[in-house]
Amino acid sequence: MTDLAALGDVIDMNDVNEIYIPLVKFLHLFAQHKKMLSQLQSHFIGVDEINHPFIIGISGSVAVGKSTTARLLQILLKRCYSNLHVQLMTTDGFLYPNSELEKRRLMSRKGFPESYNMKLLCDFLSDVTSGKENVYYPLYSQELSDIVPGKYGIISQPDVLIIEGINTLQLPPNGVVVTSDFFDCSIYIDANEDIIENWFMDRFKHLLKINKNNPENFYYDWANEPLNVAVDRAEKIWQTVDLVNLREYIAPTKSRANVILHKSHGHRIDRIYVRHY
Ligand SMILES: Nc1ncnc2c1ncn2[C@@H]1O[C@H](COP(=O)(O)OP(=O)(O)O)[C@@H](O)[C@H]1O
Ligand SMILES: CC(C)(COP(=O)(O)O)[C@@H](O)C(=O)NCCC(=O)O
């Protein structure tokens, strides 16, 4: 898997062969079914066919491995079905910028439902599903830990769109718009809290290490203070922000997913649940 290694991801090859490739075939089955139904419906109504993308939502805790799984699925989908145009995006871009979060006193609630511009996300999804040629979305930078001003990603009529984010299965606070209504299939990545905490801390320490000499990076200041001080702070963030969000808002959405991938130590998948109703 040289493509993944190039992105810095190290995925267990047994999991790729035994779990992810069958999962990709399962998703392709869904996608073919949707395309066929859409062709029949257009023909029946007598309208031109629109290329509605097949949308896969990936949800789960911060640091559970959503973006890594999303990248892997994108690569495998392209590898197995080379004619498919597969795009990937994250809902992080729909967080309010830090300046707005500060104004709303929501900096310590980053990632919670109220910290996202859900209206913008639903308008975006509506444009994508209606087959619009180019749909722009804001970009979030983990380097800045903020929205990048004036920079946008583009979704250009993909056959498959993978959307990953902690809020993908959530009901918004005002109960009006539901992002998961736009999904054709949803995947929840699950693991025990203490194991996810280890992954969160390992990723944090890795970010400190690689940004020690990078003053542009959000982690630079932390990387240059004593390690135990930075680690204590990250542990506090996990306990008071990300773990609270997981318990209150993310884990309760698990039962809404079509597929649950349960991971154990070393990110090995030890259980899979498929909803078949
Ligand atoms: N399948 C996997 N195998 C090995 N490491 C993984 C795997 N999935 C995620 N990781 C590691 O776990 C950490 C969190 O993963 P990431 O995809 O960034 O999570 P999320 O997008 O859910 O916040 C990262 O350090 C990543 O490299
Ligand atoms: C931007 C995020 C909400 C998204 O998390 P992701 O699952 O993409 O890693 C998260 O990385 C975040 O910033 N949470 C706030 C608390 C923290 O710094 O972890």
Image: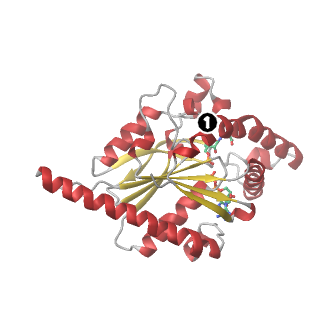
The residue positioned 33% from the left and 64% from the top of the image is 32
Q: Tell me which residue sits at (17%, 53%) in the image.
A: 42
Q: Residue furthest front?
A: 277
Drawn side of residue 213 relative to residue 45, left or right: right
Q: Which of 103 and 27 is in front in this view?
A: 27
Residue 114 lies in quadrant: top right
Characterize the local packing of mark 1: few (<14), some (14-19) or many (20 or more) Cα atoms within 10 angstroms: many
| Residue 277 drawn at (x, y percent) | 44, 51
Instruction: Identify residue for label 1.
Output: 249
Task: Identify which residue is drawn at 57% across, 47% down.
Answer: 141
Give the answer, above or below, for where 11 lies relative to 139.
below
Q: Residue furthest left?
A: 46
How was the colour assigned to the protein in this rendering? secondary structure
Residue 48 in view in this figure: no
* Left or right of 11 on screen, residue 97: left
Image quarter hosting the N terminus: bottom right
- Under mark 1, the amino acid is Tyr
Nearer to the camera, 230 or 256: 256
Above/below status of 21 relative to 255:
below
- Left or right side of 117 for 132: left
Q: Residue 87's x, y, as percent?
A: 42, 59
Quadrant observed for ligand 1 in the rendered image:
bottom right
Q: In which quarter of the image is residue 53?
A: bottom left
82 or 139: nearer the viewer: 82
Direction from residue 15 to residue 258 in the image, left or right: left
- Residue in view at x 39 percent, y 52 percent: 154
